[in-house]
Amino acid sequence: MPPLRRLGSALLLLAGLGCRNQPDAPIVIEFWAMGREGEVVQRMLAEFEQQTPGIHVRVQQIPWSAAHEKLLTAYVGDAMPDIFQLGNTWIPEFAALHAIERLDDRVAHSPAVQLDDYFSGILDTNVIDGALYGAPWYVDTRLLFYRTDLLQRAGSTRPPTTWEAWLDTMVRLKARAAADDYAIFLPMSEWQPPVILALQLDAQLLRDNDQYGNFRSPEFRQAFSFYIDLFRRELTPRDAEAQVANLYQDFADNYFALYISGPWNIGEFQRRLPSAMNDKWGTAPMPGPDATRPGVSTAGGASLALFRGSRHADAAWRVIEYLSAPVRQIEFYRLTGDLPSRKTAWTMQDLMHDRYAQAFWEQLHHVRSTPKIPEWERIADKITQYAEAVIRERMSIDAALSALDADVDQLLEKRRWLLRTHPASDARTPSATPR
Amino acid sequence: MNRRIDPAYWFLAPALSVIVIFFFVPVAASVLLSLTDFDIYAVASRADLRFVGADNYLRLLHEPLFWVALRNTLYFVLIGGPLSVGVSLAAAVLLSAKVVRFRGVLRTIFFLPVVTTLVAVAMVFRYVYHPRFGLLNYGLSFVGIGPIDWLGDPHWAMPAIILMAVWKNFGFNMVIFIAGLQSIPERLYEAAGIDGAHSWAQFRYVTLPMLAPTFLFVAVMTMIGYFQLFAEPYVMTQGGPAHSTLSIVLLMYQEGFRWWNMGYAAAVAFVLFAIILSLTLVAMRLRRQEPLGTPLPGERPDAFRDRPSRRRQKKAAPQGERKSASDSESNDSSTVRAEALEARLPHSPLAAR
């Protein structure tokens, strides 16, 4: 607690002592939210406090980069907040820690939270072994951002919808581009592009109840080769994210015409691109492997979770209910640009016809969760490592995939041991930065 | 048996207990930790914690990534260390030369990078190293060197980091060298000049030998510091590209705080500790052969305005003694002192050899 706050609490306490007729002290709900969301939710909850006297919500804002570490340390140190924002790839981990409460019963009796109103792919990330652990707060997925003018110059009136058309478009973009410009930008440090491609081909990333790596499967191999090929044909620069000084500047300078990214960049592109670029970019759902299969993408976003040991679980649940209402979701969208998790909110705001959000509406109906185990983020990191080794021609594709499987098998050793020793309990858990 | 506890212990107790609680206990806990597979599952339930003995250490030795990290760290220490010391020495000699003007201003400017926040420096250097818009490539283009992807090419990333680290750190060692240079008596140079020694010969036969103790101190401190390479790659490259800037400390950080493999990370820490300890022991043995730095009892520090040549002193006194940074300013001794040394040596327990 910062000293000022502590002083404030002390004064409040004194004031409380001075006032004899003090009714029951209000219940204080601790709420941790990350980054911009934390800033905004504080304002939104003022109205909640007016409506529900007796409940005071104390929001603590924590930076995304430290969030995972801070939540874990808080759990170990027995200092968990009552409610917290949880990236949905972290849910399996906190479920395995027994740090979050199952919400099935509460949801069943709540008129405010309607499960069928959520995007099913996103909701699924909150379900671990059949139990619901979080209420999706906002949604996130990745799709194509593109430069309309460059695409037109390359002879495409519409963004590609199949891999074949996509590749063709990229080849034409590259042919038209200046010598050191590229068709697409896929930062080598990001695991999402190869994984999205693999999910599109229905690749099972792990096998036998997520106990072993399955990266030598024909599906993953095909997706991986497609990804590597983009680098070999120099359609994408061999850059990691760190080497790009200013993404927005580069996008405006024709350095690349396509970029796979998430909803937060709608706002960023609007704010940061030079005004001449205003009408020259758009968003489109991911292309699929062929015309019969939609281009699925990852199911991301963040949920609201309830701490299992919370002393004010009922009051805390009312906060979650309040924030889950479609009206609040719209307010939240206006303040942050985060896309609402409830379809009613989209309809009320007519978001599905919004120029940039439209593609996300379509994409959100085709999202798939990555393996829901605590080791996932580490596995994803291994995928980028081996992909980089192949891109830099230090390994062949086959050697890299074998090594990847071997590494992942080793990572999952503890999980196999846990499943062997206590088969009843779920050793399912996770960690990964959302976005 | 005398059951009285020496009162000294009572006076030492507060300080000792702080050291024990905040230093020895955590270190001992880390040793134990490195023998377990403490991870996220163990956080959830202590029952899922397994004692694995030396497995973490064995796994480490079979882990290619550890050897990559060790190689990168050695690369950084062996190239960056000497380079850093060399640049500091050159800058110190330059700033001590009488012909150079504005020495005070230059000294301050050279020292500025040391007090600048490393993260800010790293961010700026990322722009300097930018392959397309970077200042460095722009400068190189005038001498006909094509664009280099400094932080993106596995061959250039470590040199780029070394360059930055040297630029950032040389000022500190420079100040120590300047102090060392100031303590070399002017008359030695005069004598050498009369004997016909030109500036290079004076540097080689007067400056370098007289600076030897400072030199060793600087070298050891730089080595220890450089072995702990972390912030530069953490901010600039995250260990990439293709692990070419992954250092041992960065590996430990990633294992421990990114993936929560606390047991394994503790093992990495102890291996690094063993490496640094053994190299420091080697350096201490080297130091033992160096002249005594601290004033002897009965000597007035201001009496040590000059000292005999090192060769002569060495002949007289191959003895050992600890020396620290603050000593370098008063590490000159007079002939009187050399005699005092000779007189004292046979009785000194430190005169091991």
Image (spheres, rainbow, N blue to C red):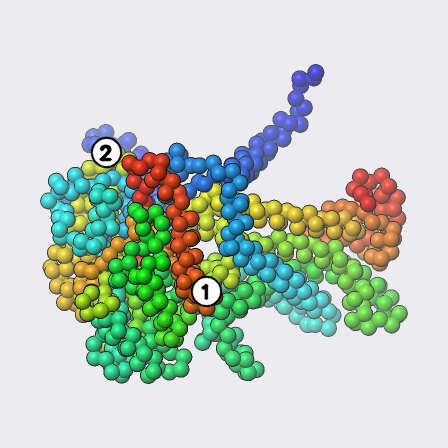
| Mark 1 and mark 2 on one chain | yes
Percent across and percent down for residue A423 are 31, 37
Marked residue nearer the N-terminal end (1 or 2): 2
Residue pictured at 21% horizontal, 43% vertical = A130
Residue picked out by circle 1: A395
Residues tagged 1 and 2 counted as in contact (Cβ below 8 A): no
Q: Quadrant of residue A317?
A: top left
Looking at the image, residue B178 sits to the left or right of residue B157; the answer is right
For discs 1 and 2, the disc positioned in front in the rendered view: 1
**Residue B119, position in %: x, y?**
48, 60
Q: Position of residue B58 (x, y in %)?
A: 53, 45
User: Looking at the image, which is closer to me, A258 or A217?
Assistant: A217
For label 1, count other residues whose C-alpha is less than 10 Å away and answer few (under 14), some (14-19) or many (20+): some
Judging from the image, mark 2 belongs to the subunit labelled: A
- For image coordinates 23% across by 36% down, the residue present is A312
The image shows residue B173, relative to residue B128, as above or below, that is above
Q: What amino acid type is highlighted by mark number 1?
A: Met
| Dot 1: element | loop
Q: Chain of mark 1?
A: A
- 3D distance between C-alphas at marks 1 and 2: 65 Å
Q: For mark 2, does the 10 Å Cα neighbourhood hold few (<14), some (14 to 19), or many (20 or more) residues?
A: few
The quarter of the picture where residue B23 lies is: top right
Say which element carries label 2. loop
Query: Of residues B210 and A356, which is closer to you in this image?
Result: A356
| Count of picture labels | 2
Residue bearing the label numbered 2: A25
Residue A114 got which mark? none
Q: Amino acid at mark 2?
A: Ala
Figure quadrant of residue B13:
top right
Quadrant holding the N terminus of chain A = top left
